[in-house]
């Protein structure tokens, strides 16, 4: 099972006739009209014809199943409407591992045995591997030879089982489902209070459980001292909370295998419920308000972070546009040979400003003198020193129309 097989085949046809069609068919007891395997749904993706219309008629069967067992024969027809079949055909027997469960119906606490049957030839001492829901079975069960024993069986053992032979795990058996029946278990009660009428408070009790087969009857009881009073049936019951209906309740779940009771559930007195419901409503309102405040706070925080990010980006962009420069303005003289020497001569720029004045206007002459640097700390200080001196008449006459000014910024 799951393997592939090639059926080698050759044929001859009358020389004076031409081949019209070739195909393989599966011989049946009542097979008056042979049918091409390729056209049968159950053989879809399982058949590949490797022959031709001359002499080869080889057939390939892929991913063989047990249902593919039987006799296969080749057939061809000619254009002269003659038909020929290669009978007897080829018998193929497909063997596979098969799982059987005993007994077929099992209840929790009983014993069940799985048997992995096979018809093919195996090694002298094969090892069988068992799987539950596709995973190897490795706990609490006994596997010997080709059998798997579950004793006692529980509801947790329910599932799909298969087997395989070690070394040939890709060729596993069919899947057999184990259905374990058990009485109700995990029975519990839930309570829902309601004040829709605003004057009368009602309560709904719901019983839940796990069972196979499913629960068919739920019975409700109210404890009264040492006795238990039946208060209703069904999966859920509802009633108004009064002094007569408050107390301890439990449910009993029944199926055809048995029954089980839940634990006690307390329905509080009417006055307690009257206090509980407003408290619950108040708590819900507080929680809703806190939730809204939290959302508002997060929204504001997110908005602030966005604004700060934008401001930071704007400042960064503004800073990138700033240009820093150091300018030294030095006075020029009428003597082109005269030089002014500084320590930072290579790193400074010089600019001169000349203003022409009318000869008729008497203008005093002013000269600016640069203050020398006195210490290394002055490198980072911007300063200027201006000295006003009245020039001589001769000098004033020579430079009558020129004023020189100089400012040094270090």
Image (cartoon, rainbow, N blue to C red):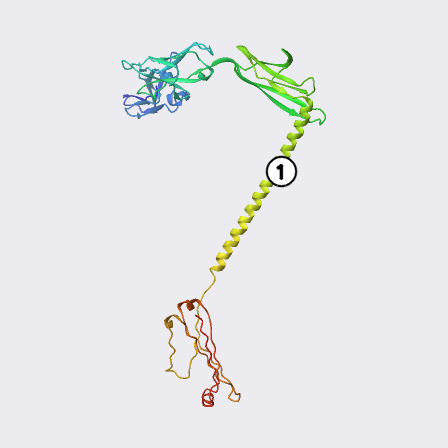
Which residue is most to the right? 199
Q: Answer left or right for 390 relative to 219.
A: left
The structure residue drawn at horizontal position 60% and vertical position 38%, both measured from the top left corner, is 290
| Residue 114 percent across, percent down from the top left | 39, 12
The one nearer the camera, 248 or 62, is: 248
Few, some or many C-alpha atoms within 10 Å of disc 1 (few <14, some 14-19, many ≥20)? few
**Quarter holding residue 341:** bottom left
**Quarter holding residue 294:** top right
Which residue is most to the front? 374
| Residue 157 percent across, percent down from the top left | 44, 16
**Quarter holding residue 219:** top right
Q: Answer left or right for 249 relative to 62.
A: right
The one nearer the camera, 387 or 10, is: 387
The one nearer the camera, 134 or 155, is: 155
The one nearer the camera, 85 or 336, is: 336
Q: Quadrant of the C terminus?
A: bottom left
Q: Quadrant of the N terminus?
A: top left
Q: Answer left or right for 139 relative to 203.
A: left
The answer to whether residue 297 is seen in the rendering is yes
| Residue 291 percent across, percent down from the top left | 59, 38
The residue beneath circle 1 is 289
| Residue 368 percent across, percent down from the top left | 46, 79
């Amino acid at each position: 099972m799951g393997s592939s097989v090639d059926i080698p085949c050759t044929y001859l046809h009358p020389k004076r006739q031409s081949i019209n069609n070739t195909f393989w068919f599966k011989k049946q007891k009542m097979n008056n009209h042979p049918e091409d395997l390729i056209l049968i749904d159950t053989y879809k993706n399982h058949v590949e014809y490797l022959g031709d219309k001359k002499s080869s008629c080889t057939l390939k069967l892929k991913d063989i199943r047990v249902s593919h067992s039987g006799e296969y024969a080749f057939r061809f027809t000619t254009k002269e409407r003659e038909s020929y079949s290669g009978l007897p055909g080829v018998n193929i027997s497909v063997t596979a591992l098969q799982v059987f469960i005993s007994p077929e119906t099992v209840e929790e606490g009983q014993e069940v045995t799985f048997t992995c049957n096979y018809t093919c030839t195996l090694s002298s001492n094969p090892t069988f591997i068992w799987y539950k829901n596709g995973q190897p079975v490795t706990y609490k069960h006994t596997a010997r030879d080709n059998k798997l024993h579950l004793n006692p069986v529980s509801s947790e053992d329910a599932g799909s089982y298969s087997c395989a032979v070690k070394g040939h795990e890709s060729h596993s058996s069919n899947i057999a489902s184990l259905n374990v029946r058990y009485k109700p278990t995990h029975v519990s009660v839930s309570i829902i209070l309601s004040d829709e009428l605003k004057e009368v408070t009602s309560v709904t009790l719901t019983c839940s459980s796990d069972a196979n087969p499913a629960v068919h009857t739920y019975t409700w009881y109210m404890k009264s001292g040492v006795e238990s009073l039946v208060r209703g049936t069904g999966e859920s019951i509802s009633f108004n909370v009064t002094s007569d209906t408050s107390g301890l309740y439990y449910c009993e779940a029944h199926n055809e295998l048995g029954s089980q009771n839940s634990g006690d559930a307390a329905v509080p007195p009417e006055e307690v419920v009257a206090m509980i419901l407003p408290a619950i409503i108040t708590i819900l309102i507080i929680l809703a308000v806190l939730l809204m405040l939290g959302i508002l706070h997060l929204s504001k925080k997110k908005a602030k972070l966005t604004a700060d990010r934008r401001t930071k980006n704007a400042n960064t962009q503004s800073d990138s546009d700033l240009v820093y420069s150091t300018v030294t303005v030095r006075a020029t003289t009428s003597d082109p040979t005269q030089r002014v020497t500084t320590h930072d001569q290579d790193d400074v720029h010089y600019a001169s400003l000349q203003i022409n004045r009318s000869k008729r206007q008497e203008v005093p002459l002013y000269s600016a003198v640069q203050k020398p640097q006195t210490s290394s700390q002055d490198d980072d200080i911007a300063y200027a020193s201006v000295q006003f001196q009245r020039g001589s008449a001769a000098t004033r006459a020579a430079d009558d129309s020129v004023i020189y000014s100089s400012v040094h910024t270090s």
